[in-house]
Image: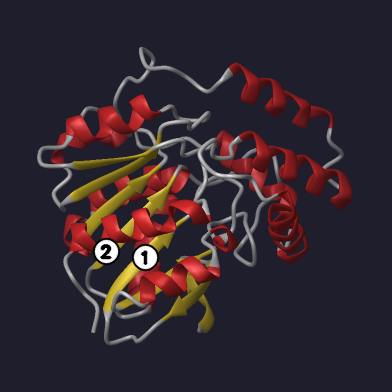
Amino acid sequence: MNERIIMADGVEIATQAFGDPAHQPTLLIMGAMASMLWWPEAFCRELAAQGRYVIRYDNRDTGLSTFYEPGSPPYTMDDMAEDAIHVLDAYGIDSADVIGMSLGGMIAQIGTLAHPTRVRTLTLMSTTPVGIDTSSLPQTSDAYMQHASAGESVDWTDNDQVIDFIVRDARMIASTGHPHDETAARTLVERDVKRARNFVSATNHFMLKGGDAWKDRLAELAPPLLVIHGTADPIFPVEHGELLAATVEGAELVRLEGGGHEIHPGDWDEIIAAIGAHSGSLRR
């Protein structure tokens, strides 16, 4: 396991790698308000066991990466897509299998459209299409929206309140197909909050703009695409994943029965097997 901070265009990005650098590079891009810790270390190691060199990293405003004052982020999703490319550059990687989760999936779509030769295969999890009108699709559940609105009353300078709220958030987005481990969720959230340089800055992710240059161009995605989506996702209902897969010729769709907006250990085997089949047998 290798940790390093890279610098690109004045932005510090914290990264961590697993596996043999000689193996197939695989870049993991996490979602909103979530540092790289939300790609569980054991999950990363299982991916590496396929014969991969796995890299996870903290997006801007999370973890140990550069952060900004909350309220008006001076960057866009397009900038975050460039961050992903800069990570590949820093590791000397020409092209990688890219896996994006939620907002990370949107970032991955933009990065792939902008730099198609840098992405060998693309896997998008629990995300929504970029540049396509999704207003006719089912939207975020009312129950989750009610929970999210309670965030306005949280004192984001009080770590205990923040941790309690994020733990509740983890419960709200959890799988219905597997038991929710609240103790494990709290341990992860506590670690994430305490590790962050300025956790409240992660709320900037909900104000992000970008992707306008790619309106109605999603079908141009060149690398082989795998879409993985839980059937019980309350943030982006499964229809978002279905539309994403239907828009890109040759895309594969894997539905996780009862899957929420998370990477549940009970789904790891199915997820990792699907990624392995999608990108070819790599185990060495």
Q: How many numbered marks have been drawn onto this rendered protein structure? A: 2
- Closer to the N terminus: mark 1 or mark 2? 1
Q: Amino acid at mark 1?
A: Leu
Residue 51: quarter of image: bottom left
Q: Residue at x 51, y 30 (%)?
A: 235
- Residue 204 at what x, y percent from top left? 62, 42
Q: Residue 138 in the image: state x and y as whole percent.
A: 42, 17
Q: Secondary structure at mark 2?
A: strand
Q: Quadrant of the C terminus?
A: bottom left
**With 168 as the anchor, is 241 left or right in this view?**
left
Q: Secondary structure at mark 1?
A: strand
Q: Is residue 22 above or below residue 103?
A: below
Bin the neighbour count of mark 2 within 10 Å (Cα to Cα): few under 14, some 14-19, many 20 and up. many
Q: Is residue 22 left or right of residue 61?
A: left
Q: How is the image coloured?
A: secondary structure
* Residue 144 position within the rendered picture, expressed as x and y whole percent measured from the top left: 63, 25
Mark 1–mark 2 distance (CA, rounded to whole Å): 6 Å
Q: Position of residue 24 (x, y in %)?
A: 25, 76
The residue positioned 48% from the left and 32% from the top of the image is 233
**Mark 1 lies on residue:** 27
The residue located at (54%, 39%) in the rendering is: 175
Q: Residue furthest top?
A: 136
Q: Which residue corresponds to mark 2?
A: 97
Pointers 1 and 2 in contact (C-beta within 8 Å)? yes
- The residue located at (37%, 33%) in the rendering is 128
Instruction: Check disc 2 and give the amino acid type.
Output: Asp
